[in-house]
Every structure is written in structure tokens, then in C-alpha cells.
Image (cartoon, helix red, strand yellow):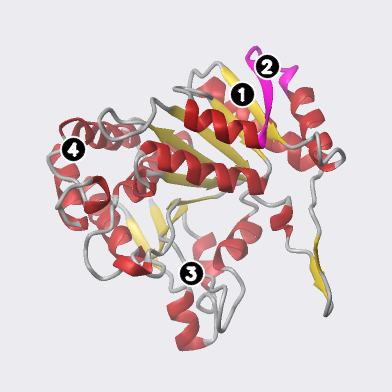
Amino acid sequence: MKVAVIEGDGVGPEVVRAAVSLLERYLEVELVRIRAGRSFFMESGRPIEEGGLERIRECDALLKGPVATPTRGPSYPSVNTLIRRSFGLFANVRPFKGYEGISLRRMDTVIVRENLECLYYGWEVDDEERSIAMRVITRRGAERISEFAFRLAEREGRKRVTAIHKKNILKKTDGLFLDSFYRIASRFNLRADDEIVDAAGYKLVKLDDAFDVMVTPNLYGDILSDVAAGIVGSIGLCGSAQIGDDFAAFEPIHGTAEDIAGRGVANPIGTLVSVSMMLDWLAERGKVARGKGARIREAIDSLMRDRTCLTPDLGGECTTDGVAEEIIRRL
């Protein structure tokens, strides 16, 4: 098995190194290091090393840390967007699991976010007086992400898929998304319903187990993911997969957290969850034995139950490496 690794910026190198330590001690893996992100751009003028995308393409999957795309000062093409578009990673999968004594609500929800369209399509124009962003929803994209969500629900034994939208205002774009969703829903023996995005945010905060699988256009899923992470107890607990037809990238959902970078206190669990998702995906393709990803999640669950070693974001005093070592020990 060959895995490309981008450490990223800020706390990225710390959490990725913790995950790599687990990977190397857990199974045989060849790691291919790729330099990318803001720090590499400041050195080289490139967002990713020359030939980096080709080297990633030669691997079975990509594990990456968060990379910075500055909103002020010198800017450069987003590494995340470059990777998504280069590999056609149309589905962003983000599971959220609550833990007793840590989370605000009981939660076991998966947000499936369309990853290539909506306002993140990248069409913007401006003049001195106005700026305009183009919102793109295609039937192909909406049907593809809806089918992905229903198949995920079937595979995981889930019962309900909810489309998130704002059709009451965005009648054409979200109207197309919702129509496409129900076309796909008719093919599956699962409960299908829909929710307006602001009401969905309210229900996530207000109700236990408000949703099972949520399927969303790009922007809504991005925002609701952070709401869900807050309910879980820390964005540092949450991992993600970006999946295409024949390649996938895995990363924590948190950002670079520059304020704590270099202190060794970043929560590595989201990155370890991402590793477990990567092993699930690779197992489906016969690259690793089935059950490897589940064992990592079981070790994480065990730690979250007894809470003997937690990072400061969860009220503990353990380090990034300390948490990773404890999870490795439980494996």
C-alpha cells in the first residue's frame, strides 16, 4: 500500500506525524511525502511541489493535514481546490459522533457534501462597485452526490437521508438540487426527506439525533459541519474523506490553528479518524484487510469513554503525541 502524505501548515505537521506514527506501526505502508501549502509557497512560489500531483496519482490514497489559503497578504491557488478538481473528488464525507460527558447532544450523523460545485465553483467577477459570485448546481452533480449519500446510508445500515437546501429563496439552483435528490431517492428503500438549511442548523443544536445522513450543496455542508463539530465537543475530533470515482483524500476538518501551532497540544483524533476512514476505503478496494479502520475507531471510543488522556481542547493536559501513543497502545 502506498499513501501520499501532505503535512500542511500550522498544526498540520503535528497531527499528521501522529497519524503516520500509528500507520507505520499498524500495517505495512510506503509513504510518499509531498510538499504543499503556504509555507512551501513562501519558499518556492508554488502551492505544491513540481510533479506533486503526478506523484500523488501514483499512490493508493492521500493523507493530508490542513493547508492555509490566506485571506490577507500574498495569495496563491488553493491546494484543497487544486486536489479536489485534479482528482474529481466530488463527495466530502464528514461523520460526527457524540461522546457522553463531552458532547452537547447525542449525535451519530454523516454530512455528505457535494465538493465541486455551488459557490465554490470559482467563478467570480468584480469592478469598483460590486463583486459577483456564480453559484453552479448541475443535475449531474446533484444526482451523483445524492446517489452517493443513499449508497453510504445502505452500506452503513442507516435509515434516513435528508437533503439540505434553501429552495424557498434559491428556487432555481436549490430547486434543481432538491428535484435531483428525490429522483434518486425513488430508487432506494430508505426514508428520504428535506430540510431548509437554517432550520437544519437549529435542529442540530436543539435536538438529539436530529439527522442520520445529510446531503448538501457545497457551502451548506461546509458551514453545518462546523456546527456539528461544536456539538460533538471539538472540531479536533472530526475527520473527513474526499472521494472520487477512483481516488480519495483524507484529512481532519479543522484548520491550521496557528495560535497553537508548535506547542504540541493539537488534538490528533480527527486525523486518526481520517486514517480509519482511509483504511475502510482501501479495504473496499482490496488494498488492506477489512476491519483495520474499525479497530482504530474502537480504540478512540475506548479513550473517549474513560477520558484518561485528552488534549486541552477537551479539558485535558495530554499532548498530541501522548494521545496518539495512547490510542496506539489500545490497538
Asked whether disc 1 touches disc 3, contact meaning CB atoms under 8 Å apart, the reply is: no
Of helix, strand and loop, which one carries label 2?
loop
Q: Is residue 55 magenta?
A: no
Between discs 1 and 4, the one toward the N terminus: 1
Q: Nearer the viewer, residue 277 or 309?
A: 309
The residue sitting at 40% across, 55% down in the picture is 2
Residue under label 4, please give it.
Answer: 331
Q: Residue furthest top?
A: 189
**x then y, percent, for residue 218:** 66, 47
Rounded to the nearest angstrom, the CA distance separating label 1 from label 3 is: 32 Å
Between discs 1 and 2, the one toward the N terminus: 1
Q: Quadrant of residue 87?
A: bottom right
Classify 10 Å Cα crowding around label 1: few (below 14), some (14-19), many (20 and above): many
Kindly tell me whether residue 27 is visible in this rendering: no
Classify 10 Å Cα crowding around label 2: few (below 14), some (14-19), many (20 and above): few
Q: Nearer the viewer, mark 1 or mark 4?
A: 1
The magenta segment: 185-197
- Any mark on residue 20, and which? none
Between discs 1 and 3, the one toward the N terminus: 3
The residue sitting at 47% across, 34% down in the picture is 284
Q: Nearer the viewer, mark 1 or mark 2?
A: 1
Q: Check the image and report above or below for 329 versus 11.
A: above
**x then y, percent, for residue 90:** 64, 47
- Any mark on residue 161, and which? 1
Residue under label 3, please give it.
Answer: 68
Residue under label 2, please give it.
Answer: 188
Under mark 1, the amino acid is Val
Q: Nearer the viewer, residue 18 or 102?
A: 102
Under mark 4, the amino acid is Leu
Rounded to the nearest angstrom, the CA distance separating label 1 from label 2 is: 10 Å
Q: Residue furthest right?
A: 172
